[in-house]
Amino acid sequence: MKKDLIDIRDLSLAEIDELIGVAEDIIDNPSQYSDKCKGRKIATLFYEPSTRTRFSFESAMLDLGGSVIGFSSPTDCSVAKGESVADTARTAECFADIIAMRHYKDGAAFVAASNVNIPVINAGDGGHNHPTQTLTDLLTIHREKGTFDNLTIGLCGDLKYGRTVHSLIAAMSRYSNVKFILISPEELKIPENIKTEILEKNEIDFAETDSLEAVMPELDVLYMTRIQRERFRDPTVYARLEGIYILDNEKLNTAKSDLIVMHPLPRVNEIAVEVDDDPRAAYFRQVKNGKFIRMALILKLLELNEQERVNGNFSKPSKLGAESFDPSIIRCDNARCISSIEQGLEHLFVKTDNGYRCLYCETKAHKSF
Amino acid sequence: MKKDLIDIRDLSLAEIDELIGVAEDIIDNPSQYSDKCKGRKIATLFYEPSTRTRFSFESAMLDLGGSVIGFSSPTDCSVAKGESVADTARTAECFADIIAMRHYKDGAAFVAASNVNIPVINAGDGGHNHPTQTLTDLLTIHREKGTFDNLTIGLCGDLKYGRTVHSLIAAMSRYSNVKFILISPEELKIPENIKTEILEKNEIDFAETDSLEAVMPELDVLYMTRIQRERFRDPTVYARLEGIYILDNEKLNTAKSDLIVMHPLPRVNEIAVEVDDDPRAAYFRQVKNGKFIRMALILKLLELNEQERVNGNFSKPSKLGAESFDPSIIRCDNARCISSIEQGLEHLFVKTDNGYRCLYCETKAHKSF
Amino acid sequence: MKKDLIDIRDLSLAEIDELIGVAEDIIDNPSQYSDKCKGRKIATLFYEPSTRTRFSFESAMLDLGGSVIGFSSPTDCSVAKGESVADTARTAECFADIIAMRHYKDGAAFVAASNVNIPVINAGDGGHNHPTQTLTDLLTIHREKGTFDNLTIGLCGDLKYGRTVHSLIAAMSRYSNVKFILISPEELKIPENIKTEILEKNEIDFAETDSLEAVMPELDVLYMTRIQRERFRDPTVYARLEGIYILDNEKLNTAKSDLIVMHPLPRVNEIAVEVDDDPRAAYFRQVKNGKFIRMALILKLLELNEQERVNGNFSKPSKLGAESFDPSIIRCDNARCISSIEQGLEHLFVKTDNGYRCLYCETKAHKSF
């Protein structure tokens, strides 16, 4: 295990199981953990606001007996002065023992982790990764269902852009006899590469549908997501679709009695408020689990980092196989990539079957020649 | 007593006396309280900035040995993503033991309290309620004068819109032999319903005047408020009035030697800075009292909530007698009401002598038919 | 020593040495200080964002076992409501034991300190003073070089506007056999008064040059600063100069092996990222030293303030020799001076050889007659 958590794929199944085990022990014996991080500090570097995620990290550290420094939006930090992510991370390293970073650019947490010797947790980098959300989802499934195996998991809504959905599919695909039902409008279907590279490659059972009602009775887990108006060019299409994927008590009538309904939150209206009182509504229990898994993660990473400090050898995000190119030869065209704004960043690319991808945001790189 | 404090009228005289008693004990024996909330967290959800009130809640919790999570303005929370007050409160409940909420909409704290099983303290909801300010004012009067009875209280400035003035009148009206002198320009006189429903109904002695100087010698307490330029259509009227209600050393010459001058702060210029050095200026002592009464309140509400948790039966804001109507029949027209923006909120109304009032903001509802 | 630190010149050499001694003891024995401020609170009043300085003060207090209240930008405090700096400071005094204030106006911390009985630390007031940066610089030089004497110090970049450079010259001029090399473009040369009133007056050896490369081999300390594009009327001049003062590995080739490179940060591009790996790059160690010297300072000021509290006699910023004038006679024309916005502030001036200077911002006052 590395000192950082940038991408859920950094963790092996055994490591995930260990984190979930620690989180469940914390839930059972909170007082045994209440001083574990006495004298330690987390720096919550939130370049965009995210109340839930920030509260989750901060209360995780507080419940471990540690304390918090941080900022919660770009208006109250030095971004305006043009400081790089690398320098802000190095500065935080001077004061804190661990960093949780949220940034609007893909790859920002990778850049931070590459520049410091303390653990960096990616608390969401643009539309790219959000590994602690996936850990939260996994802990929730484990606590609610008692197992990861033999589950039929419905994923509903925006399956095209929803990064938490993609990560959850990748993570759950590693367990036995899991079936996915992918429920979305045509416009928001799961990307082809998720189907070919994860589902089909691993021979996972899955089905696609545009009807939530048709598949409801089969589901053990229903993972709802928000359909964002901005995703649609044609507002009449949005208006037509909006209601179909709103979960209400009536649609739940045909569901199993031990179904669990999950949602990464915030919701707008895709789950009616009336559903909150249904015992199958697990989304606020899910929020609570977020704190416990982050407590386990903070503990584990600090422990690893302590060992590294003794060894004098710090694990950093892997640049294995990465090559540096001049922008006149190969460049990343993703405007949301950290490489589009970070001062002094080496532009690195990894060779793939059909070209190169940017090391930071993982999008296909453009050949300039 | 309920687990929440939304409106000062939720508290009986005995409950107020108990809180004041605890606050005064905290002042005398601070070290006995410094670990009372160890391991507990307050969530300060401030949808609009209010440095003084936020500092007061946060240092109250810190001085009880607890800790703080929160946000201090809409720019650093998830409001921009359209999350409802109910969902934000439910999220905070996952991480904290008690919530202090400040919101720009009337009724927001009521909505929060209705949705969670932990205590919610209203730290100001629009122009509606601000009960901890009133508790602060009461503790200040009690500490400074030694009693609530037999006092002549001058209220000066904007008596029309000043919610703290209305609450203080309601609270003090319950004590013996209190006299109010209402000092304001014609344009900012106390509303009729305060006179009829509180003062006259309870046979309280009161007088109205537009001259601060004329009544100064009689006063035991002078409660100053800010006159806001925005309240006046005609700027020349504002300009004429502005100076009349500015308290300076000269105006204090005729006052009793044991008068106390109070102000909810911030002031702009309605109390000259020179007055600060006068021992009768109590407004910064008042700020300090705000912390102590909030410490008492946090302790009391957490204790009540603990009992409720044992019983499994949580007190929620009363919806007694509230009826739900379709907006096409009865609706709340108050643009500052939380019901104008909150997703999924049931629109509830309470029958009054001459119609209905909105459950959330208490303004008269409009009949659509 | 006074209870406040507003200007580095408030400290004698002996007091600076004492602070550095305590900071070095904290570095050696951190656990002996981890409870020194238990139950104490710092208020970080940051009217403009400064992540590094704020983090430094906050983690200093946390590492002393205390806690923090504060705001980090004008959007989350009561500035919008027009509250004066004096009133905000008095409010903070009701809740905290010590204040660190950052403000965009010159003289703001002086005004705060004049109005409260708890220590105020100036964390930067406009372009005026930033004494804890200078203390940080001094601790860094002492730790890295083992002495303050017999050093050749290169100061490079914007020597005209850089307040940290001016303060460092003033502070280092008090030690033995220090030589300054002032490296800047013509447009950004050190102000005349620094040369005459500090360097020449104290018979300090110094030289001026526009070539960093020419003097590199002589230097024991190289203090880099940012050249701000906004300082140049002619962008082609900026473009020409920009590169000349960028420090990279090549320019370091001729430097002493025990040179130290310092920078107050944030940097934009004036030090190439490649330099970070050179052991002579001391600027992130400098950031870390910032926390330790602030711990020493907080401890010292709280101790002094405790004694004052016993005596009932609080030291306040000196208004010695200050006279009050009506703006029609003498006024401060500095738009960045706190006196241009602060309500109810007495306009005070100090007589100089050739007129008056504003007490708050120290700029030459304008005679209206």
Image (spheres, coloured by chain):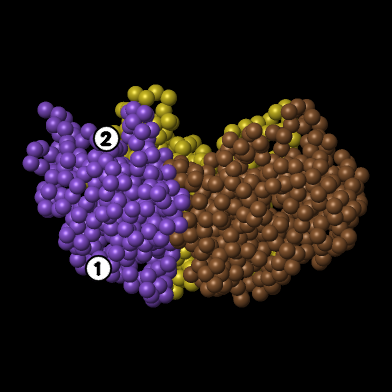
Chain colours: A brown, B yellow, C purple
Q: Chain of mark 1?
A: C
**Which numbered disc covers residue C18?**
1
Q: Which of the 4 quarters of the picture holds residue A283?
A: bottom right
Q: Position of residue C82 (x, y in %)?
A: 37, 39
In the picture, measured across the screen, residue C130 lies left or right of residue A260, that is left
- Residue drawn 18% across the image and 45% down it: C194
Q: Within 10 Å of the Cα at label 1, are there few (<14), some (14-19), or many (20+) other Cα atoms?
A: some
Task: Identify the residue at image location x=63%, y=72%.
Answer: A30
At mark 2, the secondary structure is helix
Residue C70 relative to residue B343: left or right: left
Name the side, left or right, on which C267 lies relative to C23.
Answer: right
Report x, y in % for residue A262.
76, 53
The answer to whether residue B310 is visible is: no
Which residue has dot 2 on it? C187
Callout 1 secondary element: helix
**Chain-order first, disc 2 or disc 1:** 1
